[in-house]
Image (cartoon, helix red, strand yellow):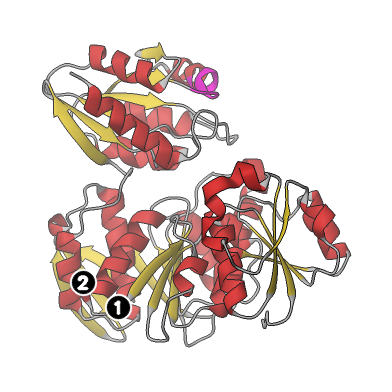
């Protein structure tokens, strides 16, 4: 889409909205910025737009800023069913998202990854692989670095590795990755999408513009993905840690094997993958598929899998004190993600659970906790504490404790844990009841743990 000389309303002046305004200005648009907060309330957030020719309609609802607008760019946090979005469309205003708009205007190649869990680790690892292969690489999207921000300085030979959320796909029309991966699908964000069918449909929009020249990567170990594979037009690669696949990445006799276009290559031992846990082996296999599809040699993939340390807030070791290891998994924002963390625990563990309610069923998590020989105690915080406690009791888990704050939870875990234990923050919930986002929750957890004497 050509934005030159169009009147574009950018709604929401968080980081992605500010970056979107900058990118639109670079491409000749007349930009109007809008937020319910006033200029004074936004403060330093608007600093990148200082002295730029933007029209300001701040401290007011977006619907009050529609006059003469051709296009409206919304942030992922705004559902496409919001009243003002529906009204804009009725008025003939084209509505798009920051990710879609950035894709349309950015130079370079783009690949993308979605799934309920594992996205951030996989895009970070894949970005590292491309960098090790000598590509100037930008890891963007739902990971927290706006696509628009990277597009401001990118060049035509650059590579974009894009983490895609279901929210961002609601407004995707032209989005077209050369290679795209769906890692898994489990219950999440039903407070926004309503049903699993709708959640899955929106996720699959990532593949809608692919052609036979593109590559679609799927997890062969996730039965929920099996009926989706036939829906794509691109060449299919599968990854599996449990069985051999015809085309893609798998584990055979403890070795990671890549099979692509009739050629089979052994990459490295599965036990050489530096990031821990069976879920991270899956992430590594997915990244290996994507890299292979884009022409990265096997030795570069091997080196990257052996050296990549993982991402902040995902099963991140914080410190050891009095023989107790403290682990930050604040990115465990849903049931399946926390199940993955539980499966990596190999020492007695006190787990901190609870947060914002996304209308999820905690029963599968509690069953996994009961099946594990290592999850001994659970300290509950946040809005979902009652729901989790009821589920724990119904399933027969006995080590239940309640805390009012994260600090209180950490103190209780410290009292419960003995030498040789773990204390694991993996809430299985979003953070918005007590924190601005999972990153803030994780940072505060680390600060509180590092203050322990």
Of 299 and 285, nearer the camera is 299
Choose between 346 and 353: the one closer to the eye. Answer: 353
30 with respect to 447 (left or right)? right
Residue at coordinates 56% horizontally, 61% vertically from top-left? Answer: 50
Which of disc 1 and disc 2 is earlier in sequence? Answer: 1
Horizontal and vertical percent position of residue 202? 62, 60
Q: Percent position (x, y) of residue 113? A: 44, 64
Chain part drawn in magenta: 382-388
Q: How many marks?
A: 2
Q: Nearer the viewer, residue 115 or 161?
A: 161
Residue that label 1 marks: 292
The answer to whether residue 354 is seen in the rendering is yes
Residue position for label 2 = 301
Residue 383: in magenta span: yes
Check contact, mark 2 vs mark 1: CB within 8 A. Answer: yes
Quadrant location of the C terminus? top left
State the residue in front, 384 or 1.
1
State which quadrant residue 160 falls in: bottom left
Position of residue 79 measured from the top left corner of the image (x, y, whole percent): 69, 52
Task: Locate residue 56: give its quadrant.
Answer: bottom right
């Amino acid at each position: 889409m050509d934005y030159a000389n169009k009147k574009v309303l950018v709604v929401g002046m968080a980081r992605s909205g500010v970056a979107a305004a900058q990118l639109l200005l670079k491409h000749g648009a007349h930009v109007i910025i809008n937020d319910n907060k006033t200029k004074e309330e936004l403060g330093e957030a608007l600093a990148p737009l200082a002295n730029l020719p933007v029209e300001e309609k701040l401290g007011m609802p977006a619907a009050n800023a529609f006059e003469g607008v051709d296009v409206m760019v919304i942030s992922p946090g705004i559902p496409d069913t919001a009243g003002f979005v529906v009204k804009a469309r009725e008025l003939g205003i084209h509505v798009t998202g920051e990710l879609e708009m950035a894709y349309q205007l950015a130079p370079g190649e783009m690949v993308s990854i979605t799934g309920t869990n594992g996205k951030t680790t996989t895009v970070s690892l894949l970005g590292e692989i491309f960098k090790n292969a000598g590509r100037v690489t930008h890891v963007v999207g739902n990971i927290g670095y706006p696509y628009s921000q990277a597009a401001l300085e990118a060049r035509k030979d650059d590579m974009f590795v894009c983490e895609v959320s279901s929210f961002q796909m609601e407004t995707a029309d032209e989005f077209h990755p050369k290679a795209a991966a769906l890692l898994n699908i489990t219950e999440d964000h039903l407070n926004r999408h309503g049903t699993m069918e709708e959640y899955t449909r929106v996720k699959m929009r990532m593949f809608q513009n692919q052609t036979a020249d593109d590559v679609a990567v799927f997890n062969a170990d996730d039965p929920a993905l099996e009926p989706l594979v036939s829906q794509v037009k691109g060449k299919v690669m599968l990854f599996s840690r449990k069985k051999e696949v015809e085309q893609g990445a798998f584990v055979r006799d403890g070795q990671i094997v890549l099979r692509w276009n009739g050629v089979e290559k052994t990459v490295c031992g599965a036990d050489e993958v530096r990031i821990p846990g069976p879920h991270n082996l899956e992430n590594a296999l997915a990244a290996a598929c994507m890299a292979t599809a884009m022409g990265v040699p096997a030795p570069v993939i091997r080196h990257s899998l052996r050296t990549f340390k993982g991402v902040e807030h995902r099963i991140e070791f914080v410190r050891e004190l009095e023989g107790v290891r403290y682990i930050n998994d604040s990115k465990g924002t849903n049931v399946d993600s926390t199940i993955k963390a539980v499966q990596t625990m190999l020492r007695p563990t006190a787990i901190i659970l609870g947060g914002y309610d996304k209308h999820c069923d905690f029963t599968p998590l509690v069953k996994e906790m009961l099946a594990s020989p290592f999850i001994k105690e659970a300290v509950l915080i946040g809005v979902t504490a009652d729901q989790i406690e009821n589920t724990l009791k119904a399933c027969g888990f006995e080590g239940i404790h309640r805390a009012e704050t994260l600090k209180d939870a950490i103190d209780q875990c410290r009292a419960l844990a003995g030498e040789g234990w773990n204390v694991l923050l993996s809430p299985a919930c979003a953070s918005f009841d007590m924190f601005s986002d999972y990153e803030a929750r994780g940072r505060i957890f680390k600060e509180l743990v590092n203050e322990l004497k």
